Every structure is written in C-alpha cells, then in structure tokens.
Image (cartoon, grey):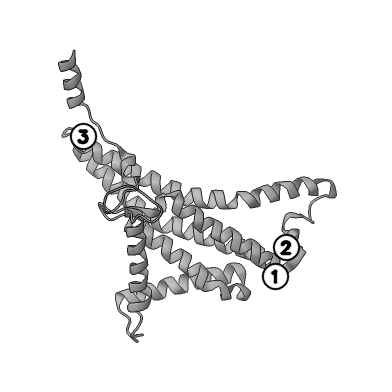
Amino acid sequence: MATETTAAEGSSLVFHPMDQFIVKPLFGGEMAWYTPTNVTLWLFFAVLAIIGLLVLSTSKRAIVPTRMQSIAELAYGFIYKMLEDICGKEGVKYFPYVMTLFMFIVTANFLGLIPTSFTTTSHFAVTIPLALAVFLTVTVLGFVKNGAGFLSLFWVSSAPLALRPILAMIELISYFVRPVSHSIRLAGNVMAGHAVIKVFAGFAAVAVISPVSVLAITAMYGLEVLVAFIQAYVFTILTCVYLKDALHPHH
C-alpha cells in the first residue's frame, strides 16, 4: 500500500498557484513589522522605476523626446486630461496626488509581470491602504470645502420625498463600501490573473498538453498586460469620480 501511495503521489501533477503570493523575509529569520520582505523589495523597485521614468528621463527636457520621455509625457497628459474632464479646473490642483496613485499602481502591476518577480498589488496589505487614503482624503476634503453641505451627497433631492430617506441610507452605505470595493477590485483581478497563469504553467509540464498550455500562457500573459493597465486606470478614474463628489456634492 505504501509503495502504491508513493507511486500515485509521484505520478500526480502537484503545483500550488497561490505560493507566488507568499510574503517571505529577504534574509531569512522570523518575520516582524520591520523585516525586509519580497513585498518591500518590489515596492522599492516600483519607486525606483517611477523616479527613473518621470524624473531622470525628463531631466534634459529634450525638444525631440526619447522613448522614455515620450512615455512620461503621455502618462502626464493622460492623467491631467482625465482629472480635468471629470473634476473640472478646480480638480487640477490635486493632479500630483492622482498622478502618483496611477504611476505607482501601473508600475507595480507591470513589474509583477516580470518572471520570478513579486506582484505587490495582489496583496490587500497594499491595496487597502491606497483605497483608505483615497477615502479619507476625499471625505476630509468634502467637509473642508463644503462644510455640512457635503452631506447633500447622500440626499437625492430629485427623488420623491417619501423615497429620499431610503435612498439616503443606500447612498450612505455605498459611500462607506467604497474603500472595500476599491481595494478588492485591484487586488482580486491581479491575483486571479497571476494564479491562472501559474495553473497553465503547471500543466505545461505534461508533454501531451504542453503545446496547448504554452499557448494558453501566452494568451493569458497578453491579457494580464492589458489588465495591468486597465486596473490602474479604473482605480484612478474612480479616485477622480470620488474627488468630484467631494468638490461638487450636490446631486
């Protein structure tokens, strides 16, 4: 029986797609709040990449831009136009914050596509603070700019009077659910895509289906490149929408 069990285990296809999301200390030992981990390492790489793209590549301000400078200028114009279209001229003053959010998320997402790297945005420990920062910033800004008038965001004055209290409760609940959906959407989509790629990679070890697995991995990787940008875009555009609510809370 023991021999049969060993043989069965040896012939089975065993892989763990979620192992790629395990947080590990860089230098071994026990984990503490100050321990450098693979997460902090790739967060640091994301910051370095952003500095290289937005600071170093644009420092010469060449009339004929390099490829890196062109990417930086496209990113700048893209976020600026998005913020201006959604929030108006009043929202442009918050451009540095929104631009920082977008560049951090999109850079971390693309770095996570490098083989053997770590995808930091797949962890709620990264996405929840980002979403909470947006939620608190928007809430504080809403009360600072509008005072008690910010509460009009929850009062649908265009609805029939009898329905307004019910709609106010729904609006209030949906407002406090924002950081939850904001963070889960980003981490969940990134985590799911990487897990699927890992599953296909595990099946690639089986000779009979390896060609199909390689094709599936290629297709999923192409999709993940698209998702890396789309999820950063969605997070940013929702931030702009929430910012608009803080600046103009009246329905």
What amino acid is labelled 2 in the image? Phe
What amino acid is labelled 1 in the image? Lys
Q: Position of residue 223 (x, y in %)?
A: 35, 51
Residue identified by numbered label 1: 145
Residue identified by numbered label 2: 150
Dividing the picture into quarters, in which one does residue 141 lie? bottom right
Q: Residues within 10 Å of mark 2 (few under 14, many from 20)?
A: many
Gap between marks 1 and 2, in whole Å? 8 Å
Query: Do tag 1 and tag 2 residues touch (Cβ < 8 Å)?
Result: yes
Label 3: element kind? loop
Q: Position of residue 57 (x, y in %)?
A: 32, 78
Q: Residues within 10 Å of mark 3 (few under 14, many from 20)?
A: few
Label 1: element kind? helix
Which dot, 2 or 3, sits closer to the camera? 2
Q: Residue furthest top?
A: 1
Q: Residue furthest right?
A: 161
Which dot, 3 or 1, sits closer to the camera? 1
Gap between marks 2 and 3, in whole Å? 58 Å
Residue identified by numbered label 3: 209
